[in-house]
């Protein structure tokens, strides 16, 4: 028994040669298996001959060592990318040749490898085999899971070399870098407008298609993106999270706040090309330009009268409906428009904003002043 143990130890090679003998033994077993086949039966003569024509053991040993060391000797002549295995290179080359031999039976989309097809099929099956051990959220791909887990770890391994900002995924970094380069690779085929992100293009295209997939559960109004829906829902909740630093007034979206702040700054970035008059809002400029064009796109369904502004039409329609939504808190009298209410309230306050250039007499309403001025003419 003692002699048997000693003889076994004696058969073991020195530690510095163990890897060499192990690799050669592995190659020998593979050669024997390749010759005999998976069934264990000897292959046909021409198959054995073909095997003999293949690489020598030393060459196969060399390639095996390259895989162990991570050396990438197989290089793509088109793009320069390198691989440690020839079959990996062959698979990569399909990107350049356009060969897509693996086809999805559900949608017809084609792929260069069976692995890519398998991943794609999960879109149709809904399979999400990779789960987060922190929150339980599931994913179709390991890469998506890994990127998600960085939310929990707060890891941001991808940094912008221009501004130093860090990101949890390489795709987010790529999108960010387009801010510096100005690159907008996603183009709208309808109007030619370009975007830096594919999801921004998708939202934009709904303007052309008229698609509004997001609906308000309270009033049923539809929106073409989630942010618009969220802003709309604040009408129901009364939430106004954006505050003006100057006066403290609150707004339900950033664009309304930005427009309001121009009252304080005096900024009027929108200019009329006909008369040069400037405005703080693009919608106000658009309404103003109808004075020059004579356009009156808003029509009354009751009498056919047309208007250049929507709110003017809405005020007019109250003549037909009899609605008077603006009430005086002093006497209870109601009015069709807010401007009429404002003029009326001056009878209580005694404010007289309008004065006659000829005699200096003052009036609370513009109409009263005009009537008075006729006396001088």
Image (spheres, grey):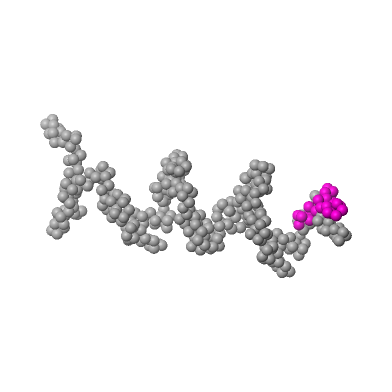
Residue displayed at 63% across by 54% down? 270
Query: Taking the image as drawn, is residue 276 in sight?
Result: yes
- For residue 143, side relative to residue 353 (left or right): left
Q: Is residue 35 magenta?
A: no
Taking the image as drawn, is residue 234 in sight? Answer: no
Q: Is residue 356 magenta?
A: yes
Residue closest to the eye, 185 or 361: 361
- 69 on left or right of 372: left
Image quadrant containing the N terminus? top left
Q: Is residue 9 above or below residue 51?
A: above
On the rendered structure, is 11 left or right of 367?
left
Q: Position of residue 170 (x, y in %)?
A: 42, 46
Q: Residue at x 18, y 54 (%)?
A: 37
Q: Magenta residues, as a range?
A: 337-364
Residue 6 in picture, x, y percent from top left: 13, 31
Question: Between 375 and 255, which is closer to the camera in this rendering?
Answer: 375
Residue 272, horizontal then vertical, whole percent = 65, 58
**Residue 42 found in image quarter:** bottom left
Which is nearer the eye, 261 or 276?
276
List x then y, in percent, for residue 149: 44, 43
The residue depicted at 17 percent of the width and 44 percent of the height is 24
């Amino acid at each position: 028994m003692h002699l048997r143990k000693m003889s076994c130890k004696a058969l073991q090679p020195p530690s510095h040669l163990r890897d060499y003998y192990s690799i050669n033994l592995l190659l020998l077993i593979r050669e024997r298996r390749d010759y005999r086949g998976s069934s264990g039966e000897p292959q046909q003569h021409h198959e054995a001959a073909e095997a003999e024509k293949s690489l020598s053991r030393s060459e196969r040993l060399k390639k095996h060592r390259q895989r162990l060391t991570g050396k990438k000797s197989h290089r793509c002549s088109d793009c320069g990318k390198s691989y440690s295995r020839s079959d990996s290179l062959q698979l990569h080359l399909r990107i350049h040749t356009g060969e897509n031999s693996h086809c999805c039976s559900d949608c017809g989309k084609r792929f260069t490898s069976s692995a890519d097809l398998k991943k794609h099929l999960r879109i149709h099956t809904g399979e999400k085999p990779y789960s987060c051990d922190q929150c339980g959220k599931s994913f179709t791909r390991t890469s998506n899971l890994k990127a998600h887990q960085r939310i929990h770890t707060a890891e941001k391994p991808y940094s912008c070399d221009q501004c130093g900002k860090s990101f949890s995924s390489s795709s987010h970094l790529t999108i960010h870098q387009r801010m510096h380069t100005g690159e907008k690779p996603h183009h709208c085929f309808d109007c030619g407008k370009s975007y830096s992100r594919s999801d921004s293009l998708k939202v934009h295209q709904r303007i052309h298609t008229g698609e509004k997939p997001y609906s308000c559960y309270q009033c049923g109004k539809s929106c073409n993106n989630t942010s618009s829906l969220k802003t709309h829902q604040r009408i129901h909740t009364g939430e106004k999270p954006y505050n003006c630093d100057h006066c403290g007034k609150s707004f339900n979206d950033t664009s309304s706040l930005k427009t309001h702040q121009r009252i304080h700054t005096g900024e009027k970035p929108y200019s009329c090309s006909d008369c040069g008059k400037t405005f703080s809002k693009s919608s106000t400029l658009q309404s103003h330009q109808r004075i020059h064009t004579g356009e009156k796109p808003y029509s009354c369904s009751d009498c056919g009268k047309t208007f250049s502004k929507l709110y003017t039409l809405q005020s007019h329609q109250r003549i037909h409906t009899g609605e008077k939504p603006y009430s005086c808190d002093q006497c209870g009298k109601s009015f069709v428009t807010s401007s009429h209410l404002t003029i009326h309230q001056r009878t209580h306050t005694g404010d007289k904003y309008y004065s006659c250039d000829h005699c200096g007499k003052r009036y609370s309403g513009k109409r009263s002043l005009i009537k008075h001025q006729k006396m001088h003419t």
